[in-house]
Amino acid sequence: MVPRLGNTQVLIYLLCITAIGVLSRYSWDMSLHYLGPENSGLCACHKCLTESDPWFRELINSSPTPFLSRNYTSSEDDFIWWKHIQNERRNFDSYKTTVDRLFQIFPPIPDVVGPSPDRCRTCAVVGNSGNLKGSHYGPLIDSHDIIIRMNHGRTKGYEADVGNKTTHHVMYPESAINLDNTTHLVLFPFKIDDLLWLLKSFDPGENSANKARRANKDLVMILNPAFMKYVHEMWLGKKGNYPSTGFLTLALSTQMCDEVNVFGFGADRDGNWNHYFEILKNKQLRTGPHAGMHEHEVILKLKEQQKIGVFKGW
Ligand code: C5P
């Protein structure tokens, strides 16, 4: 039975509801104030990437999904852009069939922890620049949640400068190394053969007992060609043939983290992309097919605007 309320009781009831509303609004405002003006609860970092200027938030939020997955269907437009990177001769159907085969073996949904108001996901993006030598960045790099290295970037023997933790390692067949059981292999595919290479690398028939294992199959992730196109067009204004591995990785990190710090980016004084782990042989290397100077300017601009941290090394 529902009790009948008198006028006074109704009035008291309404007053209580209003008071609760005002108080909870007040405590919400107070918590915002406490966390600082930029932090409106998208992440638990001091400052979240997507809370900066609208254009940068838009750049991050309008991005295509960064990784391929079983449910994702690539568009033919994206494929056409991608196939020109390395003169792919096969057609879109051939691409789609290969992608379908990938997700019969590798995780159908990429393992990415999403944003949350009670999480602060920090990323260290570690390029291979010679400026890491003598930097003593090791402990700082290792203090991040996600540490992404790339290509022939190694830690053994260089721990003081580059750290020794790697959660994600970006590679393509020509730059591949073997990984331990806990590191994600992130394939940056530039042609259908790269996808086929990945399949072959994990084919049990191909991997005899004495052949080193490439990586943990359950931690494989594959960059979406549409994301590469997006970075080329929207982040770099179509400069260069296509973005460098390092620049793509930086853009990728904004999809995985709330706070991003980059290490190991920057050419030597002759403008060559030298490496911290070897002596440069080709003095005419420059930055390959990439708009290295422009990429560097964009990175420095993001630093100036306090969107990312850039550690320039020595
Ligand atoms: O040379 P590699 O491609 O392995 O280096 C990985 C990435 O690190 C490059 O794609 C580039 O973005 C960055 N890099 C750099 N300066 C260097 C060497 C590499 O900015 N001296």
Image: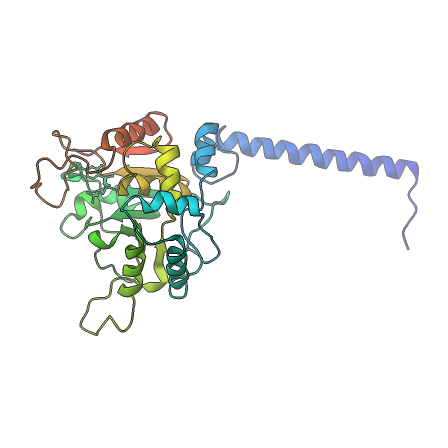
- Residue toward you, 221 or 224: 224
Q: Is residue 218 left or right of residue 39?
A: left
Q: Quadrant of residue 227?
A: top left
Q: Is residue 225 above or below residue 99?
A: above
Residue 67: where, in percent of width, then height? Answer: 40, 50
Residue 292: where, in percent of width, then height? Answer: 23, 33
Q: Is residue 95 left or right of residue 163?
A: right
Q: Quadrant of residue 180?
A: bottom left
Q: Does the image show residue 202?
A: yes
- Residue toward you, 182 or 39: 182
Q: Is residue 153 left or right of residue 123?
A: left
Q: Is residue 96 above or below residue 250?
A: below
Ligand 1, seen in the image, is in the quarter at: top left
Way the structure is coloured: rainbow
Q: Residue at x 65, y 36 (%)?
A: 24
Number of marks in the rendered image: 0
Q: Quadrant of residue 312?
A: top left
Q: Does the image show residue 122?
A: no
Residue 64: where, in percent of width, then height? Answer: 45, 43
- Residue toward you, 240 or 273: 240
Q: Is residue 139 above or below residue 292?
A: below
Residue 213: where, in percent of width, then height? Answer: 24, 66
Quadrant of the drawing holding the C terminus: top left
Q: Residue at x 28, y 65 (%)?
A: 200
Quadrant of the drawing holding the N terminus: bottom right
Q: Residue at x 90, y 52 (%)?
A: 2
